[in-house]
Image (cartoon, rainbow, N blue to C red):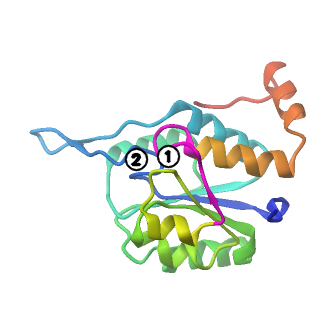
Amino acid sequence: MDNLTKIKLIVLDVDGVLTDGKLFIGSDGEEYKGFNTQDGMGISFARYTGIKTAIITGRKSEAVAKRAKELKIDYLFQGIHEKLDVLEEIKKELGLKYEEICYIGDDINDLPILQVVGYPCAPNNAVEIVKKACKKVAKKNGGAGAVRELIDEILTNQENYDEILIDFLSGNVKVVQ
């Protein structure tokens, strides 16, 4: 088993990871995306435990900006084609090593990052070459709880998850779905 106690940053792709990968574009050019509330809860719990969060995505979308703000994502980078360069900036700013980073991606543009981070992950609907590059492939698909599944695995290896749940149920943890 990988040492998940070292993970201090979780970085996410969007399309195919936080969403099911479908793009809905209205006649006005507005892009619509569907996000999973369980993923949002997982991200909120990760932040509660002190894990930093980031989104690095190749597309630009106001929906992603709104969701990232709502979830208090620490870093948001959109319209990025060289994702590894951005991750390197975040890594340096936080003083982290690659082994302290989890990245969740689903397609070939995620491979450069997946090949260097300590805990590369993918949703079940990722393309095969990506799945082969990962230490963990979720049972669930992107946009259907895969992010939550992977975050839960990290948190159960880092924290006393039962205590987090008790804090939540007692009202001490304020999270967003």
Taking 117 as reference, is 76 above or below it?
above
| Res 167 quadrant in image | top right
Q: Specify the quadrant that holds the C terminus.
A: top right
The residue under the point 42% across, 62% down is 127
Q: Nearer the viewer, residue 65 or 124?
A: 124
Farthest-out residue, left: 27
Q: Nearer the viewer, residue 94 or 101?
A: 101
Taking 2 as reference, is 73 above or below it?
above
Whole-angstrom CA distance, mark 1 to mark 2, is 6 Å
Q: Mark 1 sits on what residue?
A: 68
Q: Mark 2 sits on what residue?
A: 64
Write the start and end of the magenta stretch as one range: 135-146
Q: Amino acid at mark 1?
A: Ala
Left or right: 32 as drawn, with respect to 169: left
> Residue 95, how many percent across, how many down?
74, 75
Q: Specify the quadrant that holds the N terminus.
A: bottom right
Q: Nearer the viewer, residue 155 or 80?
A: 155
Left or right: 163 as drawn, with respect to 174: right
Q: Amino acid at mark 2?
A: Val
The residue under the point 80% across, 20% down is 169
Asked if labels 2 and 1 touch by Cβ distance under 8 angstroms, the answer is yes
Q: Tell me if I can see residue 96 in this picture.
A: no
Mark carried by residue 103: none
The residue under the point 41% across, 44% down is 19
> Residue 130, how many percent across, how many down?
49, 67
